[in-house]
Amino acid sequence: MSETDEDQKALKQELEFYRQQCNHLGAQMLRLQEEQSLTQRDARRAHTVATLVSRAYKAGEFLHDRNEIAVRFLEILLATTLYDRAVLFRFEPASNRFHLWHALGFPAGQPGQLLVLRALPERLCANSRTLPEAPIPELRAYLGLPYLLWAFEPRAEFALLLGNGSEVHTQKPFESKDVEVAATALEVLIHLERRAQMEENMHKLSLAVEQSPASVLITDAAGRIEYANPTFARMTGYRWDEVVGHGIASLQARYPATEQHNALAVAIARGEEWKGQLPSKTKQGKLYWEFTTLTPIRNPVQEITHYLLVSEDISVRKEYEERLTYQANYDALTDLPNRMLAFDRLAQALANGRRAGSKVVLIMVDLDQFKLANDTLGHLAGDELLIESAQRLRTCVRESDTVARLGGDEFLVVLPNIEDERHAERIAEKIHRAFSQPFGSQDKELFLTASIGITVFPDDGDEPNALLRNADSAMFEAKGFGRNSYRFFTPRMNVLAAERVFFESRLRHAVERKELMLHYQPIIEPETGRIHSVEALLRWFNPEVGLVPPDRFIPLAEETGLIVEIGAWVLHAACKELRRWRDAGAAPIQVAVNVSGRQFRDGGLFDTVRSALTEAGLPANALKLEITESSLVGGDVQEIARLLGELREEGMGLAIDDFGTGYSSLSYLKRYPLDTLKIDKSFVRDVNTDADDANLVVAMIAMAHGLGLQVVAEGVETEEQLAFLRRYDCDFVQGYLYSKPLPGSDLFNFLQQYQARPARAAG
């Protein structure tokens, strides 16, 4: 049976009750007529009361109008009593007074005169008590009703006041039959107004449910749907008639049962409240999320008669939460798990490995020379390289494996459930093959390699942080062996990693603690024996470990970026030292300073050089910058050429250092405004015993001269090497044959003493 049918049935039952009451009232009036010998007019009046009361109920039933109900009440009063006129006042809380509501039986305009009355009649009778001049608020509180009836009869001296309907008295000359009829009529008024108020509230509630932005379902005690509001239809796609009579479980059956669905079913079975998030499907099959609150409805004896389910579509909020969760666990650029999720996956893999007795392999992958490509080609190209690298790494592992981006150009691969370590080796080789193919970035082909570190659980450790440190140490070991290789972790690597951390932490404070110093090695013109210039060489004396070799800390400074700060200190210190020598009477020689590729890419090199020269009061030609081949590789050719051009225009010398150990591209010599080429000592060492080295040195000298460059040979330690270099017109030599690197004060003494000696090369 529908909701409308049940309402109609209840209404018919209520009307039948009212008809019975009206018939009872009519019979009562006939009995009064017989007992008290009512006049014929009174009898007719009493006979019609039932009809009038019925009309009043119908007015309330169909009109739901309080004004209409009040009018019917006054009609009953005048028709069934001796009164000719009646006024109904209603208490208004806003003004705290009784105000005229309706009046019948008065000539036009007269009821309005009642409003000017400031008090009630002098004597009032209510509930058998006399209340002389009672204030209106106290009177209302005493009676407990918001209505005040004032009925008039032409011969009456006083008024009639009706109370709550159970006990009402009047003052003479009114008869008791009038009181009984009036009291009954007042009961009708009170009941009708209460019913109208209740129906009005129910109507408001019905509108609120119908127009609610949330879905509302009402079920019976067994969970069968009896009502669904329009929002339910909009949210689910089901019409009202498609769900009424069906159980809630029939809707949930369209979505695979979850823990939340089971909890809701248990709550209904137990008669409990429940709230939570539910995944659901519309009639059309679209997935959505809803937040549902289940509330049991109980009757006065606490028996559950219905359930109320209020649901809100939270799909947008759920999507936002999922997006936030994704952002918290995944790398935005590569869509790989980030460090946090990688640690969680690693912890799970280790826990499973402990239970199953299987191995877990961690592979740390670092892209070689990525920072150089990122700085020279731009961040957009760098992002493209990282995205493609992530895609290639995914193709090298299983679905059950994890590939994560830890940050920058570092990736982590977690291989759970590994039986044989050779599987990790095969994965590493597969990664190298994947990276052997060129990368496409901004219409260019680039080549990147990867250094790989491998560690194994439980052989190398059983704690995530320790394993990550092991993999990191093995990766750095691979980088130290020339990159593009892989290494398994060994205990010795922990020692090296600890040393690296130790030196890095102390190197960061070396400048401020004045632990850095410069030594200088003279550069000699072999034909004349004249000191042409000196090269400034960086030294680090740490109080804890003593003198630290340059090959231990300079690569670390490059890697950490500290070389920019240290390099600036070297430039200023070398220029100040040269200024002191000149002020002390030394010949105006030139000082050569090594410049890192990191300083080139930092963008502040030109200003740093100019500042160092200005503070020392030196001309630009007093300084020569030595640049390694690696600083020029893969960079922005136009930007490098512009910077070198500005330095040359200032008057500074520019040398390419360690030529022959890197890419040795002739295009660098032709493209950039260099004036000096320095041959690495590894070629000079065996020029007298190795024909290949000798031929290479001769070719380098001839090529440099052909390009208008001067040549400096490094590492000259014997007279035989010097003679060979003089024979092929090498412009300058540098090495222990003349002097080891010396502190500034010792080098000044060397300059003074050497100038007083005859030219070594002349003899």
Image (cartoon, rainbow, N blue to C red):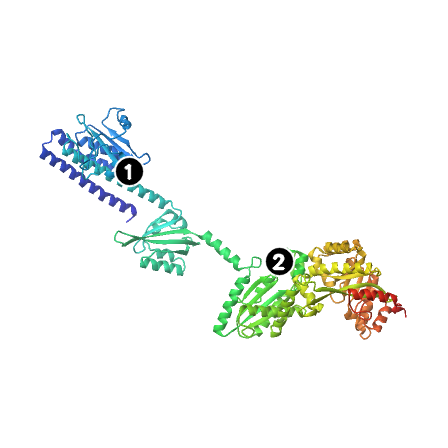
Residue 376 or residue 238, whichever sits in front: 376
| Quarter of the view holding residue 684 | bottom right
Q: Marks 1 and 2: which is nearer the front? A: 1
- Residue 632 in sight: no
- Residue 110 in sight: yes
Left or right of 540? Residue 22 is: left
- The Cα–Cα distance between marks 1 and 2, rounded to whole angstroms, is 73 Å
Quadrant holding the C terminus: bottom right
Residue 535 or residue 659, whichever sits in front: 535
Q: Position of residue 707 (x, y in %)?
A: 82, 60
Q: Is residue 463 above or below residue 5?
A: below
Characterize the local packing of mark 2: few (<14), some (14-19) or many (20 or more) Cα atoms within 10 angstroms.
Answer: some
Q: Secondary structure at mark 1?
A: loop
Q: Position of residue 146 (x, y in %)?
A: 26, 37
Residue reaching furthest right? 763
- The residue where tag 1 is placed is 64
Q: Position of residue 762 (x, y in %)?
A: 90, 68
Q: Position of residue 689 (x, y in %)?
A: 81, 75
Q: Secondary structure at mark 2?
A: helix
Amino acid type, mark 2: Glu
Residue 501 or residue 183, whichever sits in front: 501
Work out whether mark 1 precedes mark 2 in sequence or the reverse, and give the earlier one.
1
| Quarter of the view holding residue 202 | top left
Characterize the local packing of mark 1: few (<14), some (14-19) or many (20 or more) Cα atoms within 10 angstroms.
Answer: some
Q: Is residue 353 above or below residue 639?
A: below
| Quarter of the view holding residue 398 | bottom right
Amino acid type, mark 1: His
- The residue where tag 2 is placed is 384
Q: How many marks?
A: 2
Left or right of 80? Residue 457 is: right
